[in-house]
Image (spheres, coloured by chain):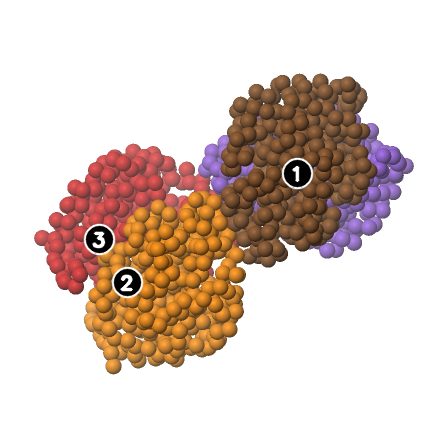
Chain colours: A orange, B red, C purple, D brown
């Protein structure tokens, strides 16, 4: 059984990760009954809410899992971290000419702020920002669709990761609000490719399906100064990795980012499919999946599980 | 000469703090010519912009200073951290019934959001939130004025810290916008004491004058799980201290919070007097003061100094 | 019994005003059971909602009344027309340097727009605009309080019209939102007198008590090119009178202005005390009072009565 | 030479319309040098700004014209009045379930308010409202395209009125912001037909080309209780016509509606092609065209011409 060194006061103590996540699994599982799965497309609506998977992946290549940790699910907005990484690799700091780095305030502002700030989205994790990122990827990667998939397979070490084209099509058909955002930015000149192409790519990216074990693994480069630990491949520079973590801690959980920072205190990213991934720099990544959501669109049991993980292990960035 | 252990790649290297801050001082000092001192009250307007002080204070009681590190200045909004600490001590998590924990989006929203969200300020570091905190302190501390001062003297170890009543009066006379915020919240029932009393206390708190050495020392309990290292006094619980740090990293630098997290990556708080304090958990606190401000109202040389400090020492929370 | 010439198709027909308003009284009286009296101050809250008075006043000095047409009530925002008239007389078109002439959009915007538009209120009939008008009056009339009262007594021909100081005091004590508006405008330099003085005068003006017969009479100068018909006194130029009517038709009924124009089609002004006055240019003025309000803060039975009056008489400005 | 009866004080005086509009033409023509033609599509950008046409059309079938009164121009948003008439004829008051009757406040709010009010546009004359009207027409008229054209030919008595398909196509290609509005409303369920179809029809409607004489004639039914005077055809009921006039006076000139009501005091509608039509109920309609626009997108010389027309004739609805 694996253990992690954690700090209490000034002493190091060892606690067993597998025990901890099993305990957490049992404690927070009942919460899934109080949330609500995303219902705006059939593919998400029909997911059984009574599921919970947790996986912890350490930098030294140990994997700990419990519950439905091997069940693939729709990663949705978590994919924005992969998209941002690709765009950041290609363009570096130049991407900040087309989008901001600041938290977005309330949901009610989505179009408001975009209009007020003349088509420059607040940050890469709100939908408008992710659409700009998709636009950048389309301009910079000739085979964007294939290259994104290969990248995700590569960092996750899982060759079976794939898009779910049915989900992508279904979201595309209901994605009127995202179309509105994209057309508004196009009117300000901040979308360079045809809007329809950008929407296609964006929804395809969101449709990626992964299991918690692959997803936790895929985030390790962010906990490891930009290097994939099991392959040694440098994805981002240390400074870029640090910056991406900063963005996750300030903007990663929609309008719950501040509350998540307050309760959990780790850089993380959530998706409406019920997944959340967080990292503890230089130590590990953790992925929780439970499809029942809270009012902010984040996994109800997932956030609770992460809060308990930081409480029980006393690990924190602060 | 003192040194700090910092991580580069996977190796520990030792660098000399005093050398580092002296180098930074020389490099960023010229920037003060490009900023602009706050000019809305005479007391701030007349400060010589060509000043820069830096102080690093370690948990093991070492102090490193350079430039005008011993010159008292108006700490302004940095005082909101002290106010929040007092309110948090008195009320615990209950304070979140009266204000939020989320970043506030743009400045232009200050009254907008407050109206939209029915008098509940976004977080304790925007003016509206700090006014609610002042209101809580007035309700909970019989001798609020004296008790706040004693608290700051206590955590800073500096018995000469004091209010500047002239500054307080001057700000009070020009503080029409803060009066508007307070009356709006009063109309929603979120200010319990008379508005005039709340404004008096708020401006008095902002008028505190401190030098970088005292201010850096005063923030050590946030880097040390809530305990003042030199006195052993427990100010906050470890969990409360972690949470206050989370708030600083997401909301501490006004509308530049995201950019500051991106560039510096540390919990910090700035004031319009030109001071910024940041902490590196379990290690140290650093205070920079330079009165010339950037367009967001934060010290121009101060932010640059802090970014260089994290770059040169490679210390980061991520 | 008096009659009014009204146009149907291309023919003139005569209908009897007294009969019409009695019929309307009986038809709309039951509506008062479905509204809600203003409850933010005791003085308004305690008014019996089951009251309805209607008065029509013609340019040739005929008065028609029904119901509680002789009961004094709190005219509240209707007084903004008198305030605007005084300021307009004193400053002419110059007043538009300090406030706009455009409808204000939604109530939710009250502070939003004021902030976005840097302290310039949308029009003189929203509270912010009326506060600026009060400020102008205080600057231009040495004995503002007395001069306003004399003016209203003069145009209404009713020497018993008076302020209700208890109502003024009570509103003043609960007027936090108006204080917020005034301080916000002060912060932009658009209030010249001390905020407290402006608020005092504003609430005093709102506390005027009049009966429908006096109020209908007092509006005749607006239906008569600026001249009080019974005294021959020129209050405004014809062009000014026309312009004040334009403002009433576009902005006179808060957020219900468009709907009122659509249903009633006359320049008018309402107050939260349940009064509404409207004019038919070159013909008459009509005042309705019924204290039960609809969701927009306008008299429920009052609006219905006015719509029926234009329907039955077929009088309209269009 | 024709004359119009106008009121001065209580006396009727006769003035000659042709003389008046010729005088106005000469006086305001120089203003066209100070405006700016719409430049967002080539077809509008290439129009010679130095043109001014005025046409007055009386209910008793007299036509008075001056300048470029017979030059066809792009009527743009003036066409919204025709669209609204068709939708209103088909659905009656039911249309108000899908859009409001209130002025929209500032332009900056266009998307803001639409989002805040959940996809219900403020009124039928802002773009969002006109898109909903287009959607209604598509649902209610089988041959919408042809039926709209026939309607306009019919009320204008000009069989040569036509769409300009090049202009429609060009606007369609640049119409990203309108696409954003339409998709946002679609996301709220307030667009029933495919967004692309609605946009096609909307831009086609805007591309109508007419000369001032035809356009003035086409508005006569609004000055005549809903009946086309020269054909006797009842287009709207008197009550509907009155209501459409109310909407024009409160919402017809974008964000300048209040100022236009203040200065001109007539129901009117403007277009970005430089045309403005206004009506004097029971008397006449007047169309002015001059392509150079002011900052609000309304014809600079056009508004001035209309203000002078009401000043010189002393005609007003108030």
The span from disc 3 to disc 2 (Cα, nearest Å) is 18 Å
Report the label total: 3
Identified at 20% across, 52% down, the residue is B311
Foreground tag (3 vs 2): 2
Placement of A39 over or under A179, stated as above or below? below
Residue that numbered label 2 is attached to: A222
Comparing D118 with B90, the one in front is D118
Tell me which corner region of the image, top left, top right, bottom left or bottom right, holds residue A75. bottom left
Chain of the residue that carries numbered disc 3 in the rendered image:
B
Residue D106: give x, y in percent of width and height.
55, 41
Label 2: state its secondary structure.
Answer: helix
Label 3: state its secondary structure.
Answer: helix
Label 1: state its secondary structure.
Answer: loop
| Residue count near mark 2 (Cα–Cα under 10 Å), binned few <14, some 14–19, many ≥20 | many
Chain of the residue that carries numbered disc 1 in the rendered image:
D
Q: Which mark is residue D162?
A: 1
Residue that numbered label 3 is attached to: B310
Foreground tag (1 vs 2): 1
- Residue C47 in view, yes or no: no
Task: Tell whether B241 sits left or right of A194.
Answer: left
Assign the N terminus of chain C to one quadrant of the image. top right
Foreground tag (3 vs 1): 1
Residue D37: give x, y in percent of width and height.
53, 31
Identified at 43% across, 77% down, the residue is A51
Task: Tell whether C46 sits left or right of A84.
Answer: right
Work out whether disc 1 and disc 2 sit on a shared chain: no
């Amino acid at each position: 059984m694996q253990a992690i060194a954690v700090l209490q006061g000034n002493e190091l103590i060892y606690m067993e990760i597998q025990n901890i996540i099993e305990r957490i699994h049992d404690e927070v599982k009942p919460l899934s009954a109080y949330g609500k799965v995303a219902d705006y497309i059939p593919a998400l609506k029909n997911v059984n809410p009574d599921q919970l998977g947790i996986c912890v992946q350490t930098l030294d290549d140990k994997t700990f899992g419990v519950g439905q940790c091997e069940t693939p699910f729709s990663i949705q907005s978590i994919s924005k971290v992969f998209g941002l990484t690709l765009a950041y690799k290609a363009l570096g700091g130049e991407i900040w000419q087309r989008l901001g780095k600041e938290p977005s305030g309330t949901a009610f502002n989505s179009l408001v702020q975009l209009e007020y700030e003349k088509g420059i989205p607040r940050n890469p994790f709100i939908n408008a920002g992710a659409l700009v990122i998709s636009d950048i990827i389309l301009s910079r990667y000739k085979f964007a669709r294939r290259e994104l998939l290969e990248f995700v397979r590569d960092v996750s070490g899982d060759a079976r990761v794939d898009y779910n084209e049915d989900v992508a099509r279904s979201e595309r058909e209901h994605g009127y609000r995202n179309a509105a955002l994209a057309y508004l930015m196009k009117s300000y000149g901040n979308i360079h490719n045809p809007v329809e192409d950008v929407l296609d790519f964006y929804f395809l990216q969101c449709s990626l399906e992964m299991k918690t074990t692959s997803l936790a693994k895929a985030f390790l480069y962010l906990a490891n100064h930009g290097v994939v630990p099991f392959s040694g491949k440098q994805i981002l520079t240390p400074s870029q990795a640090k910056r991406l973590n900063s963005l996750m801690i300030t903007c990663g959980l929609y309008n719950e980012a501040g509350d998540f920072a307050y309760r959990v205190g780790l850089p993380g990213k959530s998706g409406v499919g019920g997944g959340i991934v967080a990292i503890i720099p230089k130590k590990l990544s953790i992925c929780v999946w439970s499809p029942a959501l809270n009012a902010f669109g984040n996994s109800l049991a997932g956030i609770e599980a992460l809060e308990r993980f930081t409480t029980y292990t006393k690990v924190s960035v602060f």
